Image: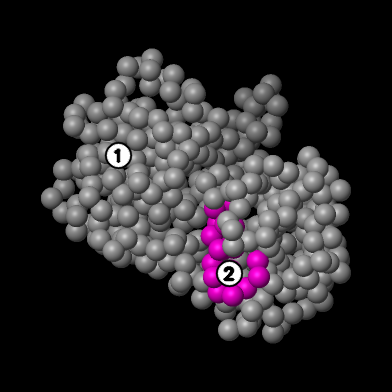
Amino acid sequence: MRSYKILLVLTPALHPNKGGVQMTTCKLGKYFSSQGHKVAVFSFAREGHKAPDEVQLHSAMEEKGAANPHNHQELAKLLGAFSPDIVINQMPYDHSIGNTLLVNKNYLLIACLRNTLFSVKGDIDAYLNRLVPKALRPVLRNRFGKALLLGHHRRRHRADLERILEAYDYFVMFGPPNIEELRYFLPDYDEEKVFLIPNSIPSVADSVPPKQNRLLWLGRVAVEQKKADLIPEIWRRLAEKLPDWELDVVGDGPFLSSLEELVATEGLERINFHGRQQPDEFYQRSPIFFMTSAFEGFPNTLVEAQSYGSIPVVFNSYPVASWLINESQTGFLVKPFDVDEMVKRILALASSPHRDKLARQVMSGAREYEIERVGLLWHELFKVGLSNRKPAPQPMTASSVDGS
């Protein structure tokens, strides 16, 4: 296998436990290094890094991230000094980064989608709150107003995707559900430019770990995307039916303190807040993992839970959910935000005599996402891409990203 010099670019600080993009970047860097490639990472964040030993970390010298021209100069210097064969941009919607990468481009340039394209389409109310002044929201909070907003978003997002597909050699998406999303915005996109490569996990446990009577919710404690405000209602109904069970909430985020206050005010017991932690021990001991998210790109936590035989129960609120979960075989899908159905499903699973068998099935399904398998897809892309390299297009126009 040929050895390459690979540069990964992202905007947040490189840290394995602070977000999906950061986690994925760390995993890819470590894997590529293990395969004999020379790997560097450039982050537009100045501080907060915890880089793997296997990668060379280069970060912005000044504040304001990708909005600071001096930080782009640092990236340009690194491109000249490192002279990569392959550049993987984890943040292709920031066109200023794309412009820097296109100057004097003589490498394979890959853009990666790290979220669902339907984050707005799937939660138009949150988009309305974010985009429209408070005084005007009642005027648009109806079917006609929401249709106007969705049309506005669709046009702007289409322009972004057109530019990304024009500027980059390849666009990496997670799986078939993303293709359906892409067609919604670009029915006539260039199919040869799109590669499907899911996120990965290091490995799957050899056997189902010993389980305890503990439910697990793990993620960024936020409302708009993660719907963490549903946790107290779900646990209130479960707690009285599962008197010998506990709930572990693992993660940090803007809603954490409010969530803790809600739990205290309502007098909910047997719910434990752990903050941000290495998740493995929680997956190992929890037979059931539930998610309340409104949207996700490729939820690493879901596949990680499966890899330890923690059976996922998930709102079917984003396209990738029904791709990762084979209903009743590798987890359970619940009608979006139907708390009653979520509670019923968890209760049935908690008392099921077939839970161990299902845990083994869940683990078997997760093997598809082990890094050794996913890594082969990356190497296939490198092989195809480097043999078909084309001249760089013109620099991008200003980003039209509007919260998608």
Q: Residue at x 29, y 44 (%)?
A: 286
- Residue 73 is marked as none
User: Magenta span: helix, strand or loop, mainly?
Assistant: helix
Quarter of image, res 342: top left
Q: Residue at x 86, y 69 (%)?
A: 104
Quarter of image, res 387: bottom right
Note whether 190 is above or below 280 in the view shown: below
Q: Where in the figure is residue 105, as x and y percent of width and height?
A: 82, 70
Q: Count the marks.
A: 2
**100 and 144: which is toward the camera:** 100
Label located before the other in sequence (2 or 1)? 2
Q: Mark 1 is on which residue type?
A: Leu
- Residue 215 is marked as 1
The residue tagged 2 is 32
For mark 2, give the secondary structure. helix
Q: Where in the figure is residue 341, as x and y percent of width and height?
A: 29, 39
Q: Where in the figure is residue 394, as x and y percent of width and height?
A: 86, 66
Residue 188 in view: no
**Left or right for 255, reference 344:** right
Figure quadrant of the N terminus: bottom right
Q: CA distance from mark 2 to mark 1?
A: 35 Å
**280 and 242: which is toward the camera:** 280
Look at discs 2 and 1 and give the one toward the viewer: 2
Q: Residue at x 80, y 74 (%)?
A: 106
Q: Mark 2 is on which residue type?
A: Phe
Q: Where in the figure is residue 255, as x and y percent of width and height?
A: 51, 28
Disc 1 packing (10 Å; few <14; some 14–19; many ≥20): many
Quarter of image, res 351: top left
For mark 1, give the secondary structure. strand
**Left or right for 299, reference 248:** right
Residue 391 falls inside the magenta stretch: no
Region rendered in magenta? 20-39
